Amino acid sequence: MKKNWWKLLPVLLMVYAIPMSFAGEVSVQTILHETIRNLYFHVTMWFSMFILFIVSMVNAIMFLHTGNLIFDVRSEMYIRTSLLFGFIGIFTGMIWANFTWGAPWVNDPQLNGAAITILSYLAYLILRSSLNDVQKKARLAAVYNIFAFTLMFVLIGIMPRINDSLHPGKGGNPGFGSYDLAPAMRPVFYISILAWTLVGVWIAQIQIKIKSISQKIKSA
Amino acid sequence: MVRIISQINTLLWKEFVLEFRNKNALNGIVLYVFSTVFIVYQSFRVVPEVPVWNALLWIIILFSSVNAVNKTFQNDGMGRQYYLYLLADPKAVILSKIIYNIVLLSFLSLISAACYGLVLGNPIQQYGNFIFVIFMGSIGLSSLLTMISAISSKSGNALGMVAVLGFPLIIPLIITIIKASKGVADGLPFNTYAKYLLTMAGLDILVIALSVILFPYLWRD
């Protein structure tokens, strides 16, 4: 129980973040209007996903460095959790886009980048399931994880900047930058990111435990 | 460093000798390019718009590259891999494979482009720059696909795996190549598409660096 105190933190943060997301003060803008509240759900999902991908990649590097299989289990479970967040991010984004752009999906570098990210991490899971040998699976998965993360970083970090994008914050569109975000929105946004990321870590922790226990049962 | 360069030389020599000793693989891939171009020609007859022309050309090049690079690690049987493992530095192995694939893919892409332009019309206005773009694109495609085929050759289903693992990762590269190549085909001034060439060069360097860092971990079996 000693180690579980931090689980109280996301719960407390959620108590603050969720009511504030629906009822808090937001900046009023043309076209966006109240849909700007999606910032608290859609954008935080992507931030949490990205943080969990980084955690997973660090675990992959640690696995290659030490060869300890626990890092591989962690790496896989963080990816599974962040994929869940990615899917929720895509759906919340589609609902938002349907109201503001008039269509759930448009051909846009940012959106395509998101879809490709999901695809490349689904490929990671397929690579894992195609291998039987535990050590080999862990090694190949770690290498692919690092490779894919770096290219994904290029894809969603750089590509939308050299092409025009409809997405808020890119290609000169009103975004969530300093000039159009009401000061009251900032704390709610940052606290939401922290809260959802901690929820993600929580989910991943449970999955890691299940996986390592089932591996122990199998080997026993 | 000197040791690695001399190993790269030897390994490259080995790749070329093996390729020319066993010409059917190379001939097969060239024939693959011809047939694909012909299928496109028979399906489209004429491609009036430059963006479509350009995109189709790069899709043909992408698929033939996947086929060409796929055999890189499969040709080395288990015995030869152990032999290399004892003698060579893994960095030399991956760099020699990448360099060999760059040569192979540049040659293939040029053949595809020539053959494609011959039957489907040729809107290109700046030949020098077009060849430069093809060369840059081949460097990117070969380094990325070499690493992917290194990963997938270790898994059971190597052929399917290259497409599954490689295509999502190759999209940023292929988008930049298509944009740069469209700029060249349209005859735009160089500085309008220079940023795509720069992005491509950055991606190439990134992928080669990652391959050199990560390949040693893939290699031990």
Image (spheres, helix red, strand yellow):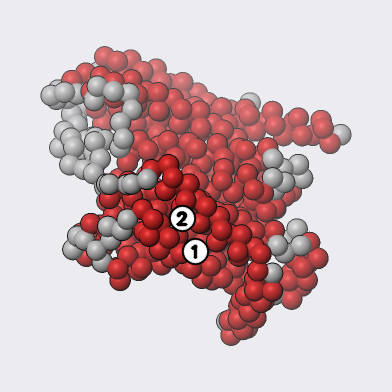
Q: Is mark 1 on a helix, strand or loop?
A: helix
**Position of B122 relative to A72 (above/below):** below
Residue A176 quadrant: top left
Count of all numbered marks drawn on residues in the image: 2
N-terminal of the two: label 2 or label 1? 2
Left or right relative to A44: residue A218: right
Chain where mark 1 sits: B
Tag shown at residue A71: none
Q: Name the residue under label 1.
A: B108
Say whether residue A140 is visible: no
What is the x, y in percent for residue B68? Answer: 58, 59
Residue shown at the point (56%, 46%) measured from the top left: B163
Identify residue type, mark 1: Leu
Q: Disc 2, disc 1: CB below 8 Å?
A: yes
Q: Locate the C terminus of chain A by quadrant.
A: top right
Identify residue type, mark 2: Ile
Tag shown at residue B61: 2
**Position of B81 relative to B43 (above/below):** below
Residue shown at the point (32%, 23%) measured from the top left: A104
Left or right relative to B155: residue B78: right
What is the x, y in percent for residue B135? Answer: 41, 67
Residue shown at the point (40%, 23%) measured from the top left: A91
Distance from the alpha carbon under mark 2 to that under mark 1:
8 Å
Left or right relative to A63: residue B85: right
Local packing at callout 1 (Cα closer than 10 Å; few below 14, some 14-19, many 20+) is many
Chain where mark 2 sits: B
What is the x, y in percent for residue B203? Answer: 41, 59
Left or right relative to B88: residue B213: left
What is the x, y in percent for residue A186? Answer: 26, 31
- Residue, far right: A220
